[in-house]
Amino acid sequence: MKFFFFSILVLSSMFSVSLAQSYTGFPKKYKVLSIKPSDTDSKITEANTPHLVAYNPEARQGKLLFFMPGTGGVALKGPKKLFATAVSQGYHVINISYINRPAVAQICRRENLAKNSKCTSEFRTKRLYGNNDFSLINDEPQDAIISRLTKLLIYLSKTDKAGNWGVYLKDGKPKWSEIAVSGQSQGGGMAAFIAKEHLVARVIDFSGGWDYATKNKIAGWYFDKSVTPVNLWYGTYHVTEPKAKTIKETYDAMEIPENHIYPFNLPVPEGKKGHSNGVRNIGYVDQWIELLGKGN
Protein backbone atom coordinates (compact mmCIF):
# COMPACT_ATOMS: atom_id res chain seq x y z
CA MET A 1 0.00 0.00 0.00
CA LYS A 2 2.82 2.42 0.87
CA PHE A 3 4.46 1.67 -2.47
CA PHE A 4 1.15 2.35 -4.24
CA PHE A 5 0.74 5.77 -2.65
CA PHE A 6 4.42 6.59 -3.30
CA SER A 7 3.96 5.70 -6.97
CA ILE A 8 0.89 7.91 -7.21
CA LEU A 9 2.81 10.81 -5.67
CA VAL A 10 5.71 10.34 -8.09
CA LEU A 11 3.38 10.14 -11.09
CA SER A 12 1.46 13.19 -9.88
CA SER A 13 4.71 15.13 -9.52
CA MET A 14 5.88 14.09 -12.98
CA PHE A 15 2.51 15.08 -14.45
CA SER A 16 2.70 18.53 -12.79
CA VAL A 17 6.20 19.12 -14.16
CA SER A 18 5.01 18.05 -17.61
CA LEU A 19 2.15 20.53 -17.44
CA ALA A 20 4.50 23.24 -16.20
CA GLN A 21 6.68 22.82 -19.26
CA SER A 22 3.96 22.43 -21.89
CA TYR A 23 3.20 26.07 -22.77
CA THR A 24 3.28 26.99 -26.42
CA GLY A 25 5.32 29.84 -27.80
CA PHE A 26 8.73 28.54 -26.73
CA PRO A 27 11.19 26.15 -28.42
CA LYS A 28 11.04 22.67 -26.89
CA LYS A 29 14.60 22.89 -25.61
CA TYR A 30 13.64 25.78 -23.29
CA LYS A 31 12.59 24.99 -19.76
CA VAL A 32 9.26 26.66 -19.00
CA LEU A 33 7.68 26.69 -15.55
CA SER A 34 4.52 28.08 -13.98
CA ILE A 35 4.63 28.69 -10.24
CA LYS A 36 1.78 29.98 -8.11
CA PRO A 37 2.78 32.90 -5.88
CA SER A 38 1.24 31.14 -2.86
CA ASP A 39 3.67 28.24 -3.36
CA THR A 40 6.50 30.69 -2.70
CA ASP A 41 4.79 32.53 0.18
CA SER A 42 1.79 31.04 1.98
CA LYS A 43 0.63 34.53 3.01
CA ILE A 44 -0.22 35.40 -0.59
CA THR A 45 -3.89 35.02 -1.45
CA GLU A 46 -4.50 37.85 -3.94
CA ALA A 47 -3.39 37.77 -7.59
CA ASN A 48 -2.42 34.13 -7.23
CA THR A 49 -2.34 33.21 -10.91
CA PRO A 50 1.05 31.63 -11.76
CA HIS A 51 4.30 33.38 -12.53
CA LEU A 52 5.86 32.44 -15.89
CA VAL A 53 9.51 31.33 -15.88
CA ALA A 54 11.62 30.38 -18.92
CA TYR A 55 15.25 29.74 -19.77
CA ASN A 56 17.50 27.57 -21.92
CA PRO A 57 19.28 24.97 -19.75
CA GLU A 58 21.72 24.30 -22.61
CA ALA A 59 22.98 27.90 -22.82
CA ARG A 60 25.60 29.68 -20.75
CA GLN A 61 23.74 31.43 -17.97
CA GLY A 62 23.24 35.17 -18.37
CA LYS A 63 21.28 37.96 -16.74
CA LEU A 64 17.70 37.71 -15.56
CA LEU A 65 15.02 39.57 -17.52
CA PHE A 66 12.44 40.53 -14.91
CA PHE A 67 9.22 41.55 -16.67
CA MET A 68 6.10 43.12 -15.17
CA PRO A 69 2.88 43.02 -17.21
CA GLY A 70 0.47 45.92 -17.55
CA THR A 71 -2.92 46.50 -16.02
CA GLY A 72 -5.04 43.37 -16.31
CA GLY A 73 -2.08 41.37 -17.61
CA VAL A 74 -1.85 37.66 -16.78
CA ALA A 75 1.70 36.31 -16.55
CA LEU A 76 1.02 33.04 -18.37
CA LYS A 77 -0.54 34.98 -21.25
CA GLY A 78 2.42 37.30 -21.57
CA PRO A 79 4.26 38.09 -24.82
CA LYS A 80 5.97 34.73 -25.32
CA LYS A 81 7.64 35.67 -28.60
CA LEU A 82 9.36 38.54 -26.82
CA PHE A 83 10.35 36.23 -23.97
CA ALA A 84 11.61 33.54 -26.37
CA THR A 85 13.73 36.23 -28.03
CA ALA A 86 15.11 37.19 -24.62
CA VAL A 87 16.01 33.58 -23.86
CA SER A 88 17.72 33.30 -27.26
CA GLN A 89 19.74 36.38 -26.24
CA GLY A 90 20.99 34.54 -23.15
CA TYR A 91 18.50 35.62 -20.49
CA HIS A 92 16.61 33.72 -17.86
CA VAL A 93 13.08 35.20 -17.90
CA ILE A 94 10.50 35.82 -15.18
CA ASN A 95 7.12 37.33 -16.00
CA ILE A 96 5.78 38.14 -12.56
CA SER A 97 2.21 37.75 -11.37
CA TYR A 98 1.18 40.66 -9.16
CA ILE A 99 -1.79 42.84 -8.22
CA ASN A 100 -2.06 45.10 -11.26
CA ARG A 101 -5.57 46.47 -10.73
CA PRO A 102 -6.40 49.23 -10.14
CA ALA A 103 -3.78 51.03 -12.21
CA VAL A 104 -1.87 54.15 -11.23
CA ALA A 105 -3.84 56.23 -13.72
CA GLN A 106 -7.12 55.01 -12.24
CA ILE A 107 -6.20 56.08 -8.69
CA CYS A 108 -3.95 59.12 -9.06
CA ARG A 109 -6.36 61.45 -10.83
CA ARG A 110 -8.86 64.19 -10.14
CA GLU A 111 -9.36 64.79 -6.39
CA ASN A 112 -6.66 62.30 -5.36
CA LEU A 113 -4.09 64.03 -7.53
CA ALA A 114 -5.27 67.48 -6.51
CA LYS A 115 -4.74 66.56 -2.86
CA ASN A 116 -1.35 64.88 -3.37
CA SER A 117 1.04 65.74 -6.22
CA LYS A 118 3.20 62.76 -5.20
CA CYS A 119 0.31 60.31 -5.49
CA THR A 120 1.90 58.32 -8.33
CA SER A 121 5.28 57.83 -6.65
CA GLU A 122 3.59 56.82 -3.39
CA PHE A 123 1.35 54.41 -5.31
CA ARG A 124 4.32 52.81 -7.07
CA THR A 125 6.29 52.60 -3.83
CA LYS A 126 3.41 50.76 -2.17
CA ARG A 127 2.89 48.33 -5.05
CA LEU A 128 6.61 47.68 -5.51
CA TYR A 129 7.91 47.61 -1.95
CA GLY A 130 4.86 47.58 0.35
CA ASN A 131 6.71 49.73 2.88
CA ASN A 132 4.64 52.93 3.04
CA ASP A 133 1.21 53.96 4.32
CA PHE A 134 -0.40 54.85 0.99
CA SER A 135 -4.07 54.16 1.70
CA LEU A 136 -5.68 54.32 -1.74
CA ILE A 137 -4.83 50.71 -2.65
CA ASN A 138 -5.22 47.63 -0.47
CA ASP A 139 -2.01 45.78 -1.40
CA GLU A 140 -0.52 43.92 1.58
CA PRO A 141 3.26 43.71 2.19
CA GLN A 142 3.41 40.13 0.84
CA ASP A 143 1.72 41.37 -2.35
CA ALA A 144 4.50 43.82 -3.16
CA ILE A 145 6.20 43.12 -6.48
CA ILE A 146 9.73 43.01 -5.05
CA SER A 147 8.63 40.68 -2.25
CA ARG A 148 7.04 38.36 -4.81
CA LEU A 149 10.19 38.38 -6.94
CA THR A 150 12.38 37.68 -3.92
CA LYS A 151 10.21 34.80 -2.70
CA LEU A 152 10.09 33.35 -6.21
CA LEU A 153 13.88 33.48 -6.61
CA ILE A 154 14.37 31.81 -3.24
CA TYR A 155 11.81 29.14 -4.16
CA LEU A 156 13.46 28.50 -7.55
CA SER A 157 16.93 28.32 -6.01
CA LYS A 158 15.66 25.42 -3.88
CA THR A 159 13.41 23.61 -6.36
CA ASP A 160 15.12 24.15 -9.74
CA LYS A 161 18.81 23.58 -9.17
CA ALA A 162 19.48 23.44 -12.91
CA GLY A 163 18.46 27.09 -13.21
CA ASN A 164 21.12 28.27 -10.71
CA TRP A 165 18.72 30.98 -9.53
CA GLY A 166 20.85 31.92 -6.55
CA VAL A 167 22.98 33.98 -8.94
CA TYR A 168 20.21 36.58 -8.88
CA LEU A 169 20.16 36.84 -5.10
CA LYS A 170 22.51 38.51 -2.65
CA ASP A 171 21.94 38.31 1.09
CA GLY A 172 18.41 37.10 0.46
CA LYS A 173 17.51 40.05 -1.78
CA PRO A 174 17.50 40.59 -5.56
CA LYS A 175 20.97 41.15 -6.93
CA TRP A 176 20.00 44.02 -9.20
CA SER A 177 23.29 44.15 -11.07
CA GLU A 178 22.37 40.74 -12.55
CA ILE A 179 18.80 41.74 -13.38
CA ALA A 180 17.40 43.63 -16.37
CA VAL A 181 14.05 45.18 -15.46
CA SER A 182 11.29 45.55 -18.00
CA GLY A 183 7.55 45.77 -18.35
CA GLN A 184 4.64 47.04 -20.39
CA SER A 185 2.39 49.97 -19.48
CA GLN A 186 1.98 49.93 -15.66
CA GLY A 187 4.79 47.36 -15.57
CA GLY A 188 7.05 49.53 -17.70
CA GLY A 189 6.59 52.37 -15.25
CA MET A 190 7.45 50.00 -12.41
CA ALA A 191 10.65 49.01 -14.23
CA ALA A 192 11.64 52.66 -14.57
CA PHE A 193 10.84 53.31 -10.91
CA ILE A 194 13.07 50.38 -9.85
CA ALA A 195 15.92 51.53 -12.08
CA LYS A 196 15.80 55.00 -10.55
CA GLU A 197 16.55 53.51 -7.12
CA HIS A 198 18.68 50.43 -7.92
CA LEU A 199 21.65 49.85 -10.22
CA VAL A 200 20.14 47.34 -12.63
CA ALA A 201 21.76 45.61 -15.60
CA ARG A 202 19.34 47.28 -18.03
CA VAL A 203 15.88 48.85 -18.12
CA ILE A 204 13.43 48.41 -21.01
CA ASP A 205 10.24 50.40 -20.66
CA PHE A 206 7.48 49.42 -23.11
CA SER A 207 4.92 52.28 -23.18
CA GLY A 208 5.43 52.70 -19.46
CA GLY A 209 2.61 54.91 -18.38
CA TRP A 210 1.89 58.60 -17.94
CA ASP A 211 2.10 59.60 -14.30
CA TYR A 212 1.08 63.14 -13.48
CA ALA A 213 1.84 65.55 -10.62
CA THR A 214 -1.02 67.85 -11.57
CA LYS A 215 -3.25 68.05 -14.61
CA ASN A 216 -1.06 68.12 -17.75
CA LYS A 217 2.20 68.12 -15.73
CA ILE A 218 4.14 64.85 -15.54
CA ALA A 219 5.13 63.45 -12.16
CA GLY A 220 8.21 64.71 -10.37
CA TRP A 221 9.75 61.27 -9.94
CA TYR A 222 10.57 61.15 -13.66
CA PHE A 223 13.09 63.93 -13.05
CA ASP A 224 14.76 62.25 -10.03
CA LYS A 225 18.40 61.30 -10.45
CA SER A 226 18.79 57.71 -11.58
CA VAL A 227 21.11 55.24 -9.88
CA THR A 228 21.15 53.27 -13.14
CA PRO A 229 23.24 55.15 -15.78
CA VAL A 230 21.20 56.60 -18.64
CA ASN A 231 23.11 54.55 -21.22
CA LEU A 232 21.38 51.43 -19.82
CA TRP A 233 17.89 52.88 -20.31
CA TYR A 234 15.60 52.03 -23.25
CA GLY A 235 12.02 53.06 -23.96
CA THR A 236 9.40 52.31 -26.60
CA TYR A 237 5.91 53.47 -27.55
CA HIS A 238 3.65 53.14 -30.56
CA VAL A 239 3.03 56.30 -32.54
CA THR A 240 -0.73 55.63 -32.60
CA GLU A 241 -1.08 55.54 -28.81
CA PRO A 242 -3.33 58.28 -27.42
CA LYS A 243 -0.63 59.02 -24.81
CA ALA A 244 2.36 58.72 -27.15
CA LYS A 245 3.36 62.37 -26.74
CA THR A 246 3.23 62.12 -22.94
CA ILE A 247 5.19 58.87 -22.88
CA LYS A 248 7.90 60.49 -25.00
CA GLU A 249 7.89 63.44 -22.59
CA THR A 250 8.53 61.08 -19.65
CA TYR A 251 11.40 59.43 -21.54
CA ASP A 252 12.97 62.81 -22.18
CA ALA A 253 12.54 63.73 -18.51
CA MET A 254 14.35 60.52 -17.53
CA GLU A 255 17.12 61.49 -19.99
CA ILE A 256 16.87 58.29 -22.02
CA PRO A 257 19.22 58.79 -24.99
CA GLU A 258 17.33 59.64 -28.18
CA ASN A 259 18.76 56.61 -29.99
CA HIS A 260 17.49 54.38 -27.15
CA ILE A 261 13.89 55.53 -27.70
CA TYR A 262 11.92 53.45 -30.20
CA PRO A 263 8.76 55.02 -31.71
CA PHE A 264 7.19 51.85 -33.13
CA ASN A 265 5.04 52.41 -36.22
CA LEU A 266 4.07 49.10 -37.79
CA PRO A 267 0.35 48.77 -38.61
CA VAL A 268 -1.73 47.62 -35.65
CA PRO A 269 -4.05 44.68 -36.43
CA GLU A 270 -7.75 45.52 -36.51
CA GLY A 271 -9.27 45.26 -33.06
CA LYS A 272 -5.89 45.55 -31.32
CA LYS A 273 -4.26 48.53 -29.62
CA GLY A 274 -0.98 50.25 -30.37
CA HIS A 275 -0.32 50.47 -26.64
CA SER A 276 0.45 46.73 -26.38
CA ASN A 277 1.68 46.20 -29.94
CA GLY A 278 5.32 46.79 -29.03
CA VAL A 279 5.56 43.61 -26.95
CA ARG A 280 3.33 41.46 -29.19
CA ASN A 281 4.24 42.23 -32.80
CA ILE A 282 6.87 39.78 -34.06
CA GLY A 283 7.70 42.39 -36.70
CA TYR A 284 9.75 44.13 -34.01
CA VAL A 285 12.04 41.19 -33.32
CA ASP A 286 15.11 43.04 -34.64
CA GLN A 287 14.29 45.96 -32.35
CA TRP A 288 13.69 43.59 -29.42
CA ILE A 289 17.19 42.18 -29.93
CA GLU A 290 18.64 45.71 -29.86
CA LEU A 291 16.62 46.59 -26.75
CA LEU A 292 17.63 43.39 -24.92
CA GLY A 293 21.28 43.27 -25.92
CA LYS A 294 23.20 40.14 -24.99
CA GLY A 295 22.04 38.61 -21.74
CA ASN A 296 25.13 36.46 -21.50
Image (tube, rainbow, N blue to C red):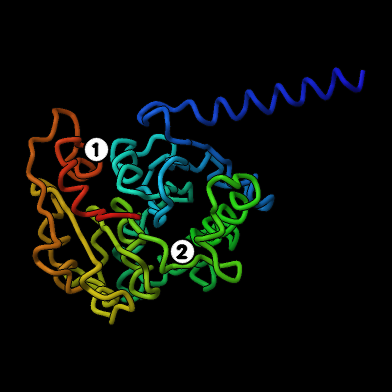
Q: Is residue 122 visible?
A: yes
Q: Which residue is mark 1?
A: 280
Give coordinates of residue 3: x percent, y percent. 87, 20
Q: At 70% from the left edge and 24% from the top edge, which residue is drawn? A: 12
Examine the image and state in which quarter residue 232 appears.
bottom left
Horizontal side of residue 115 vs 174, given as left or right: left
Examine the image and state in which quarter residue 281 appears.
top left
Examine the image and state in which quarter residue 219 appears.
bottom left
Q: Please, what secondary structure does the residue beneath circle 1 have?
A: helix
The disc labelled 1 sits on which kind of residue? Arg
Give coordinates of residue 75: x percent, y percent. 43, 41
Between the residue at mark 1 and the residue at mark 2, the CA separation in whole angstroms equals: 25 Å
Nearer to me, 251 or 211:
251
Q: Which residue is mark 2?
A: 128
Horizontal side of residue 218 vs 31, given as left or right: left
Nearer to me, 45 or 226:
226
Viewer-nearest of discs 1 and 2: 1
Examine the rendered structure and indicate whether residue 13 appears above or below residue 53.
above
Residue 171: image tag: none
Q: Is residue 120 visible?
A: no
Q: Please, what secondary structure does the residue beneath circle 2 have?
A: helix
The disc labelled 2 sits on which kind of residue? Leu
Horizontal side of residue 111 vs 1, given as left or right: left
